Amino acid sequence: MSSNIQVTLVQIDNYGPWTVTPEPRREMDLQTLQSRLFADVAQFVGNRDGYAFSTRYDNMIAITNGMDEDDHLTLQETLRNRYPITVSLGVATDSVPMMALTKATNHIQRSGSAQDSDRVEVFEGDTLDESDRSSDDLYVAHFDVENATGKYTNKLNEFETFNKLTRGYSSVMDYMQEFHGALSFFVGGDNYISICPRLGRSSFEDALEYAADEGDVELRVGVGSGRTVHDAGIEAKHELEECRHCDEEVSLGFPYEAKVET
Amino acid sequence: MSSNIQVTLVQIDNYGPWTVTPEPRREMDLQTLQSRLFADVAQFVGNRDGYAFSTRYDNMIAITNGMDEDDHLTLQETLRNRYPITVSLGVATDSVPMMALTKATNHIQRSGSAQDSDRVEVFEGDTLDESDRSSDDLYVAHFDVENATGKYTNKLNEFETFNKLTRGYSSVMDYMQEFHGALSFFVGGDNYISICPRLGRSSFEDALEYAADEGDVELRVGVGSGRTVHDAGIEAKHELEECRHCDEEVSLGFPYEAKVET
Amino acid sequence: MSSNIQVTLVQIDNYGPWTVTPEPRREMDLQTLQSRLFADVAQFVGNRDGYAFSTRYDNMIAITNGMDEDDHLTLQETLRNRYPITVSLGVATDSVPMMALTKATNHIQRSGSAQDSDRVEVFEGDTLDESDRSSDDLYVAHFDVENATGKYTNKLNEFETFNKLTRGYSSVMDYMQEFHGALSFFVGGDNYISICPRLGRSSFEDALEYAADEGDVELRVGVGSGRTVHDAGIEAKHELEECRHCDEEVSLGFPYEAKVET
Amino acid sequence: MSSNIQVTLVQIDNYGPWTVTPEPRREMDLQTLQSRLFADVAQFVGNRDGYAFSTRYDNMIAITNGMDEDDHLTLQETLRNRYPITVSLGVATDSVPMMALTKATNHIQRSGSAQDSDRVEVFEGDTLDESDRSSDDLYVAHFDVENATGKYTNKLNEFETFNKLTRGYSSVMDYMQEFHGALSFFVGGDNYISICPRLGRSSFEDALEYAADEGDVELRVGVGSGRTVHDAGIEAKHELEECRHCDEEVSLGFPYEAKVET
């Protein structure tokens, strides 16, 4: 039936002021703290078959189907016990990823400002009941660039390559958000991952065409579905390998294609 | 005097193929690996008063004034000993940051493709002699958004906030690159750091005006200089605090302002 | 009824040879690798309400009630994806901790030598069925030293303090193993944790007396029970706080004491 | 010349009370925190060619020849910026390792109790002047057990192996301390590292004989010297490889052996 996405917003409590109190802190210590905090969130969520994206680091977006309230509270506890900061969590579900995130964000926003020193370790929202979950709740599209190494990495300087890719992807990510309510994230190298609602092949063909026209970048995309975002994401990766081997632009997991009415 | 920037490009050897061999790997494990690798590079470089930026994660850009060849080789060794991957390093110096990066990138590119399995742990390029270093080799501009929490974080959903900021910054970062050869990086929250050549106050005023007009975002910027990028960066952070407290848009460290002819 | 302990032995595959191939590796890189690997195992197991102990680092002992085979396989996968080494896992259950460990160790030993390069990522053994679990499967005794800071840390040099404590504990740990089949581990500072079968108050009084006589060290102990080792361990910590506040030597959680026939 | 060892004691400030305030914290979070803190200290010290040993985790012993006061202050700063705890540092130098540690410990002890909440980030003591350093300031002995895998790991259960080795080593480590003022530490697997003063071959032969008689364990040892503990340690590891290949019990680096009068 329709997609069913549980989104958790992870927001560091009152982080901005902390970074400059009592004095501005060493930038590389902040970078290390943020990266390791994200890595810990990614591991915690990831080995429960969820995904986390670093986004702005002080705010991280996670896809958490399969994680219940206890899991969320344990995450808050383990971070509080090991870091000099705490996190608030908002969680919500919807068939459209953007909508789920908006609800999750609202849960936190209603509890106070991100820079309110009294707002500590909020947990608000609802997680999916096991009985409401099904085998195709999640749809993941994994994009990469055709021959990015040959075209960019080995030719341009790294700052130019980074900007070129960021810009190229920007168009298609906007497209995916505006037309489909998808949430898309850069995940390193030349890879983007899009958390989508259920879509047919033509939607992805249109997206790639848009990327080529507006973003001047030639993309490929593998799409998968599953009960968890990890299941959907691994299928998407296999489909992307399929694209590479068969020189196709779009590849969708079979069971997925069958059940979609475009 | 002119600025004098030592840039190191850190490139994971043959990373793309590794991520899908023998099967595509769990995305959250890749995210964890990349983030922790970056954190380790940031710590290594940072506690020698350098800066590292995560960029694409498989390619990281570091500012390394004060690190010699031995330091670079130790970095390669310690990563090889603890991670399932290795890194190549290209290092170069110039008065213009972009130019230093281009040279550093070239050093690696000339040694083979990023996806050449025979190209392992290249170290190419030259580090600064101690005798060529001076107390204002580095210039750092630290930008943030006026009241980002009130305007965005507490109002929009996190994906929209992220996109809004990314887009707003995009214009000013292009401007800094095109007109001044600066390298600018997102460092989390609503913060960007720009590694600049020597510039006067009016250059930054122009940049902020450009950001407001083209990027629809109101920025502030603190600028500092120093013998190391950490010294320059800490001064820039203090100047940015100065902006916040005195409600100014641009603040430059005094010794810096004195010696610049705009 | 009786205790019911699921033990997992985590053994790095062929680690010794790796540390000296092709050349002996930097000791601090090995220390970092081992400590972080243990930290990752501790987090993975710990946020599933299990415990892991660092033991010899290349062999770690974990108490894993509540973790099924899938959890174990995910642990193997996530380590393989991020470290230059792999691990084998043996798992077994018994009412006596030592016996469970012996079985778990046997599972791995039967699959080949720890230094057999062909023995990779063994998973052998059986996990507890949910239906076989109960609310007092685990018993944890948490020991510390009366006024260790005043007696040792603030007076002796750190090496002497460490040796004094190690030696003092050695006697009681032997006692707990020999008479009760308990597994005891140093967990930092002046703390030891003992995974025990069900025991009455007098058993712990005897152990402390033995420690004072043979090990010349005055200990306190809090004891807890639970469905998971985390539950039992947290109760033990609270009981130890009780000892501190009430100046008692032994404190047992009430429900526990009630159900024990000494 | 005589040996010349700079020792730094790293002590977490007021750690015990923190672990139980406001409530006892999850044990696996404490384990993770301690292990990662140690790993960070090991990396910081290690990539400056020093060594750190985990000891009791809330107190760590480091050998820091080559690190000056600024390095120590940077270590304090980077830990404070990223962890919920702070550390005090005492540093001292002597030709006898135990004596250097005693002085380093005294520096911290004189500044207040380890559980005094007002004693925060003490730095006391003196580092070596560059002019006082020489190419054989450090002597490292690296011990392991002959065929530990065959005799123990593949035969006993892991707890028994751990105890057997701990006990075996205990005798020789006491011997090294009592007769030579050496500091010896377990570093994982079946390996111990001893920071020694300058000693001749016969001293090590006596130590191994003592281990066999009193500790019932057959050891080998490689010994190296150098300007830094890393240099000495790497030579010791190569010498230990030499023992393995040539079936010797003791192997000393040549330049070392030449300059020792036994």
Image: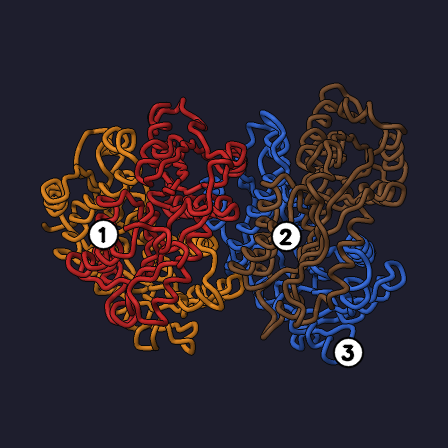
Chain colours: A blue, B brown, C orange, D red
Chain under numbered label 2: A
Q: Amino acid at mark 3?
A: Asp
- Asked whether residue C51 appears in the rendered view, the answer is no
Count how many numbered circles sit on residues in the image.
3
The disc label shown at residue D170, or none: 1
- Looking at this view, is D190 or A188 the one in front? D190
As drawn, is D167 to the left or to the right of C40? left
The residue lying at 41 percent from left, 37 percent from top is: D8
As drawn, is C122 to the left or to the right of A1? left
Chain under numbered label 1: D
Q: In terms of secondary structure, where does tag 3 sit?
A: loop
Q: Which residue is mark 2?
A: A53
Q: Amino acid at mark 1?
A: Ser
Kindly report the distance in space between the C-alpha atoms of the residues bearing marks 2 and 1.
48 Å
x, y (%) of residue B11?
Answer: 68, 59
* Vertical order, A61 against D11 (above or below): below
